[in-house]
Image (spheres, rainbow, N blue to C red):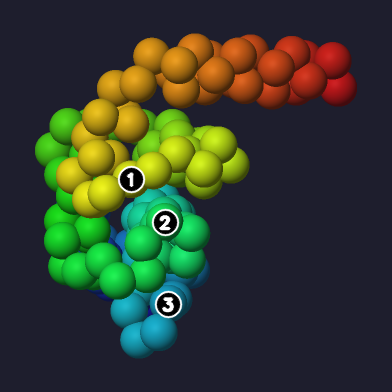
Amino acid sequence: MAEKQYVCGYKHCKIHNKIPASEAVIVGNRRYHIQCAETREKLNEMRDLYIDNIDKNVAIVELVSVLNQLIFTKNVNIDYMLFAMKNVVLRKLRIKSPYTLHYIAENKQIQTLWIKENKRKSGETFAN
């Protein structure tokens, strides 16, 4: 008997293939591809980071919309965006609106730090 197949429960799934039951990641009542579950988790982490450290009174719908635009429309690397937001929190930069995240994604200083961080991580990987 064939293994049961599921449709990914992620709205922004780019894989478009059904998931075998053995490979599905279950979150709540939904089943996701591994990559979709990771993306969803990172977006939730960014949302929580913004709410907890930048603006507790933000309209969550507006924040999620901006994050989705950056990640899925402008194709900004999700790991880079998470790094940039953590950097903003560490440096205590002032953000007045979620729309400022568009400028943070294009900030040359943060991009340089991201490149240095990736080189450092890749150097550690080769050393091990």
Q: CA distance from mark 3 to mark 2?
A: 27 Å
Contact (Cβ within 8 Å) of mark 2 with mark 1: yes
Q: Which mark is residue 54?
A: 2
For label 3, the residue is 27
> Closer to the camera, 20 or 7?
7
Residue 50 versus residue 84 in the image, above or below: below
Q: Which mark is residue 113?
A: none
* Residue for point 37% across, 70% down: 56
Residue type, numbered disc 3: Val
Q: Which mark is residue 95?
A: 1
Residue 4 as seen in the image, left or right of residue 9:
right
Residue 89 versus residue 113 in the image, above or below: below
Determine which quarter of the picture holds residue 1: bottom left
User: Nearer the N terminus, badge 3 or badge 2?
Assistant: 3
Badge 2 local density, few (<14 within 10 Å), some, or many (20+)?
many
In percent of width and height, residue 24 lies at 42, 67
Q: CA distance from mark 2 to mark 1?
A: 7 Å
Callout 2: helix, strand or loop?
loop
Callout 1: helix, strand or loop?
loop
Residue type, numbered disc 2: Ile
* Residue for point 70% across, 17% down: 120
In percent of width and height, residue 108 lies at 38, 14
Callout 3: helix, strand or loop?
strand
The answer, for residue 37, to whether it is visible in the render is no
Residue 65 as seen in the image, left or right of residue 91:
left
